[in-house]
Amino acid sequence: MQVKMNIWCLIVIGLVKAVESSGAAFPLNRHHDYEELTQVLRTTNARCKGITSLSSIGRSVEGRELWVIVFSINSTHHTPGVPEFKYVANMHGNEVVGREVLIDLVQYFCDEYHKGNETIIELITNVRIHIMPSMNPDGYEKAAKYKGYPKDYVRGRKNAANYDLNRNFPDFDKIACRTGDSNRLAYNRAYVSEAVRGIKIQPETEAVAEWIMSNPFVLSANLHGGDVVANYPFDESCDGELRHYQGCPDDAIFRQLSSAYSNGNSQMAGSTGCSPDDGFHDGTTNGAAWYSIGGGMQDFNYLASNCFEITIEMSCVKFPPSYSLPVFWQLNQNAMIDYIYQSTCGVKGFLYDAASGAPVPDAAVMVEGIQHVVYSAADGDYWRLLVAGNYAIRVQAQGYELSEIKTVQVPECRPYSAVELNFNLKKTNRRETAKETDDTLQRLRSVLLSIQQ
């Protein structure tokens, strides 16, 4: 163990020197408390006003803002046809590497945009990127106050009300296990009531759940610490076993997504885990195969919305000393960008009313052989992440006939390689009643109302 740690120290020193010599325009070797984090985001927003917007999606138990900065040529609103992506970090307040690399990432995007970096300009033009450096700012402040290193392993993990936020989301896994249904379970009021039973939803959780449900996110990653691995759904086993592989209907694409991140991080790519018991392969794992949890954010994204999310464990040490932070930026910089590119792969398109040409929102896009659907956004646009292969796809929308089946060949994922597949839907002879329209509009609100109750 001592030999392994000594080797790691040499790697840290070498990477720190490499980063220092790279001439980064922003400091990499420091931790940022809440006030400093807020200042970095405000400064970045001011420096890159044309491509960023900064807002708070809610407040923590102690009243700190839950900041989100968005990078896009249309940063304040969704652009039809442009996928929405998000990074969330510091859900556990004492797991800080993700928080710091996201602070680095927002400054990097802004700097490179001003330098005319064509790769970054193209990325910001083609993907709307949301970045939340800290979901648990209260926990961070508690962890940071502990003097010296190593930090206490659990101090600051939970929020100020002593709740683990990654066990605090509506537990739709148990419903998916029982029913076999994995499609927008948050739109079923009975399911919501069951999923929140026994859970005291925290303000941070409620804010993030509403944010997820209010945006047509395609892809996401939740950045944690304490191990080195890319973790994919499901996080909760159906048989109650602590360690049991529980794949979701989109297991193939989640394996690809996890590998895309892991392969971009030289330390993670060969990781078998920080503990001999982990047993990871090539730096990826199914969540429930590692250890089963309920109420996690990752599975909530998949079961409640269109969003596909994985969890990235970025470091064996949860709160490392500041001198080692440049290492984690160096290890994750390319991986973070490579992962964003995954949102531009698979199949995308628009759904139109065949007679009027108007967009058709809230329509189910179904892939033969995969028991999970995604739904079109308000402008009739949709994105369907898929591994390379041949697929048969059709669409179903309320008030319209079931569409014809269209076949499509999806290529290997590379930046902006999504195949465009549009549908023109024919209305049925029966008109949708006012009550049906109202029911459709009320579905999204039901999850939030149930959580508040």
Image (tube, rainbow, N blue to C red):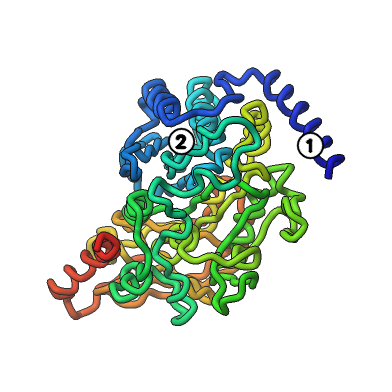
**Looking at the image, is mark 2 or mark 1 earlier in the sequence?**
1
User: From this viewpoint, which residue is outermost toward the right?
Assistant: 3
Question: Is residue 291 at all visible to an observer of this figure?
Answer: yes
Picture quarter with the N terminus: top right
Residue 141 bears which disc, if any?
2
Q: Is residue 178 above or below residue 274?
A: below
Where is residue 65 drawn, in percent x and y? 34, 37
Q: Quadrant of residue 197?
A: bottom left
Viewer can see residue 131: no
Q: Is residue 414 left or right of residue 299?
A: right
Dot 2: few (<14), some (14–19), or many (≥20) neighbours within 10 Å?
A: some
Q: Nearer the viewer, residue 50 or 237?
A: 237
Q: How many marks?
A: 2
When asked about the image quadrant of residue 310, the answer is bottom right
Q: CA distance from mark 2 to mark 1?
A: 28 Å
Where does the image place residue 263, in percent across and percent down from the top left? 70, 48
Rendered location of residue 358, percent (x, y): 25, 59
The residue wearing badge 1 is 8
Q: What residue sits 60% from the left and 55% below the top?
A: 257
Q: Amino acid at mark 2?
A: Glu
Q: Quadrant of the C terminus?
A: bottom left
**Label 1 element class:** helix
In the image, taking residue 216 as reference, residue 331 lies left or right, namely right
